Amino acid sequence: MNRLVAFLLCLSISFSLIAQSDNAYNLLPFPAQFAGKDGHFTVSTATRIVVNAKDAGQRAAAQTLANQLKTVSGFPIAVAPASPALAKGKHIVFQAHKTGKCGPEGYILNVSPDRVVVEAETPKGYFYAVQTLLQLLPTAVFSPAKVDNVAWNIPACQILDRPRYGYRGLMLDVSRNFMPVSFVKRFIDLMAMHKFNTFHWHLTDDQGWRIEIKKYPKLTQIGSRRKETVVGHNAENYPFKYDGKEYGGFYTQAQIAEVVRYAAARHITIIPEIEMPGHALAALASYPELSCDPAKKYEVATRWGIFKDVYCPNESTFAFLQNVLTEVMALFPGKYIHIGGDECPKDAWNASAFCQDLIKKLKLKDEHELQSYFIQRIEKFVNSKGRAIIGWDEILEGGLAPNATVMSWRGTEGGIEAAKQKHNVVMTPGDFCYLDQYQGNPVQEPLAGGGFLPIEKVYSYEPTPAELTPEQQKYILGVQGNVWTEYIPTTQHVEYMVFPRASALAEIGWIPQGPRNFEDFAVRLKEHLKRLSYLNVNYSKRLLDIRAVTQFTDADQLQVRLEKLDSDSKMYYTTNGKQPSTSSTEYFTPIALKKTTTIKAISSAGAQFEETFYIHRAKGKSYTYANAAAEKSDPNKKKLTDGQVAQSPRNKSEWVSVSGGDLEVTIDLGDVRPVTKISANFLKRISYNDFPPTSVEIGLSQDGTTYKDAISQPVKYTLEGSWGILPVVADFKTARARYVRIKAKNAGPASAGFPREGLPTAVSVDEVVVE
Ligand code: TNX
C-alpha cells in the first residue's frame, strides 16, 4: 500500500480526500488533488491517442506521449484525430476543458480501466498532463529503448492538478564554467519533466561573457576567454594557485535561438541574465572604456569572488548596455530580462571624479543611489521595449526601480521588503535554494563552495513568508533554485548537484500550501530516482546516505543515532573498526559510547558510513562565549562539545568563528575534576581571512573566577600553502578544575598583499577536547 497525501486545492469538487488503492502513484511533484482508484488502463497494440486535430497543443502533447510509448513498447501507437469509430474503445483521449478549473498550467486526468481522458485549457496543461501520465506508467517508460516483458499499465485515478506558483525556476551559471548547448537542452528536458516553467540563464559574469553580441564582437573574442583558472577552492591556497590553462566558450546567436525554441516546445521560458553594474570584468576586459578608469588593464577574472572593477555609469556605458540588451531582447521573447544588480562594490565609483560629480549633479545621497539610478535607467529602456527587469535583491538598496521584480537571495528579507513595496518577488534564498552548497558530509562530497543544504532542508522551505499579509503574499511569484558553477566544472557534476534537490524544489513550487510530509516525498522520490537512472542522470544518492546525530545522556555517555532518509533499507554497523556486513549488528536504537570510537555502518541500499566520535570530559557540557559573534555562529551552543570534530576547512558552518576580535569561551565541566590535557583545533584559510590565532591561553578554575595554571602559548604556522587545521594542545599533568577558559588572540586585519587586505580576520575553532 502506498502512503498518499492528498493535497487539496479547493474542496468544492467531488474528489475524495485520501483515496487508497493497491496501485502505486509515485508522482513528483504530487498533484494538487488526487484520488487513487482500483484497477488500471492497459496500453495495448490497439490503443490510440485521440486528439482534436485542430488543436496544436493536444497534438504536440499527444505526440510526446506516443513517441515515448512507441519507443519502450514497440507497439504501433499513433496519434489519431477524433472520430466516431474512436469514440468508444480503450483509448487515451485528449479533450478541451471548458469550465476554467485547470487554469493556464493545469489539467484533469481521469484514468479508468476503459479509458484515459486528458483535459486541459492550454497547450501547457496538456503537456503537464503527459508528464504526469508518464510518471503513472511503469518507470521503464523512461527507458531510451524498447523494454520487454512490461505490462504498460496506467493505474486508475482521478487528478485535478494545477501549480501553486506561476514561477518555478532553475538558474544555471554558464559563466564560471561553460555548459555546451547539448547539455543546456538536457537540463531543459529535466526541468520540463519536473514541471518547472522558467530557466534563468546566467550568461555573463567576471569569469566569462557567454553570449554573442554582433555589435560588440570583442565581448566574445576577448570576454569569453580567461587565461587560466584558480585551482581548488578560492580559499584553499595562499597565494592562489592557477592551472595555467586557457578556458573559454560562448553561444552564437543561432545557438541561443535554437535553445529558446527548444525550451518553448517544453513550455519553459528563458530569462537571460546580463550582469550590471558589477560582475562585469569580462566586459571591461573587452571594452575598458566601459570602466571608470579606461587606462587600467582589465583581464577576464581567473578566480572566483567579487571584483571592484565595475561598469561606469556614463553615457557610453548606457549606450553599450542598451545595444546589448536590444540584441538580447531580440533573441529572448519572454517578458523578463535579468539585469543582475548584485555584489557591486562601490570602490571604483568612490574613486571616480566623474561618478562623484554625477552624484552631485543628480542630487543623489550616495553610491547606492547611484546604483539605483543606473538600474532605473536600464529599467526605463527595457520597459520601453515592452519588457520588464528582474534583479537580485541588492537593487532594493538606494531605491527600487518602479516596475522591477526582485530575486531574494540574501535570505528572505529582500523579498519581504519588495513585496511590502508592492513589487513582484521570486524567492531564492541561499539557505534553501543554493544548489551549489554541500548536500552531504563535505569530506566525502566533491569540492563545493561551502554551506550545507541537504535535500530535506530544501524540502522544508516555505516560499511565501508568513510575515506578509495575504495581500502582500500575492507578490510572491514563486521559487527558484540556483546553480552557481564555480566548483562545478562538468555537466555530470551539475547533474549531481541539481538532482534530486531540484526534484524537492519542483514539488515546493507546485503543491498547495500546507504541511509537507518528507517521508511521503522520500517514498515517491525513491521511485523517481529510477526514472532519473533511466535518463542516465548522475544524481546524488544522499537519499540513501547514513548520517549520525549525537545526543548526550546523564550517564556520561554519547548516544549516536544513525539516520537515513529512505525508510525501507536496513543498517548494519560495527564499533570495533571492522568493515560491517549484513551479518554485523543491525541498527535499531542509538549506539551508546563511553570512549572514543569509530562507527562503521552500511545499509542494504548500498550506503557506507564511517565516523569517529570523540568521548572526552567536555562532551555535552555547556559553555559561554564572551563574544556575540561566536554565539551567532553557534546558536544552539553545541558545536564545541558535541563529540563531532570538524574534519575539514571546506564547510565553515562546522566551525565557531569570531571576526575582528579575540575568541573567548568558558566551558563548565559541571564539577571539579582532574584535568590533564586540553586540545582545540583552529582553522587556517588565509585567502579568506580565516587566520589561526597568534596565541592561545588556556586557563583552569575551580570557582569560575580565579584562573590558575594558565598555559599561554604562541601558535606557529606558515601563511603560505594550503588551507588546513591547526591543533593547539595544553598539558596540565595533574590539575583539578571545573571551568576551562580558552582565549585565542585574533591576528588583526590582513595586511597589504593578502587577498582580503585591510579587512578583519577571523579566529575559528571547533571541538574543545578535555581529558
Ligand atoms: C553569490 S547569488 C553570487 C554569485 C556566486 C554565489 C556563490 C548572487 C546574486 N551572487 O556571484 O556565484 O554567491 O554561491
Image (cartoon, grey):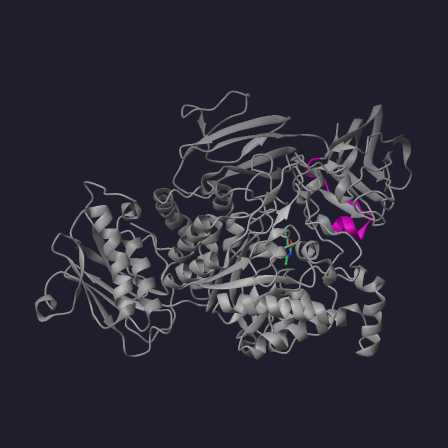
Q: Is residue 583 left or right of residue 576?
A: left
| Residue 481 position within the rendered picture, expressed as x and y whole percent measured from the top left | 53, 56
For residue 350, above or below residue 729: below
* Quarter of the rendering containing residue 127: bottom left
Asked whether, in this view, residue 665 is left or right of residue 422, the answer is: right
- Could you tell whether 132 is left or right of 756 in the image? left
Q: Nearer the viewer, residue 86 or 102?
A: 86
When the figure is inspected, residue 147 is found, relative to residue 291, above or below; the finding is: above
Instruction: Report if residue 506 lies within the magenta region.
Output: no
User: What residue occupies the far left of the structure in this picture?
Assistant: 85
- Looking at the rendered structure, the number of numbered marks drawn on it comes to 0
Residue depicted at 57% across the width and 57% down the height: 203
Front residue of 725 and 195: 195
Q: Quadrant of the C terminus?
A: top right
**Picture quadrant of residue 705:** top right
Q: In the image, residue 561 lies at what x, y percent?
A: 54, 37
Highlighted magenta segment, given as a residue range: 619-631
Up the image or down, 285 lies above or below 602; here it is below
Residue 158 visible somewhere in the drawing: no
Residue drawn where x is 83% and y is 50% of the image: 759
Tell me, yes or no, whether the highlighted magenta stretch contains residue 629.
yes
Residue 604 horizontal/vertical position (percent): 40, 32
- Whether residue 68 appears in this view of the structure is yes
Query: Residue 726 location, x and y as percent?
Result: 76, 31
Q: Residue at x 62, y 56 (%)?
A: 219
Q: Is residue 117 left or right of residue 562?
A: left
The image quadrant in which ligand 1 is located: bottom right
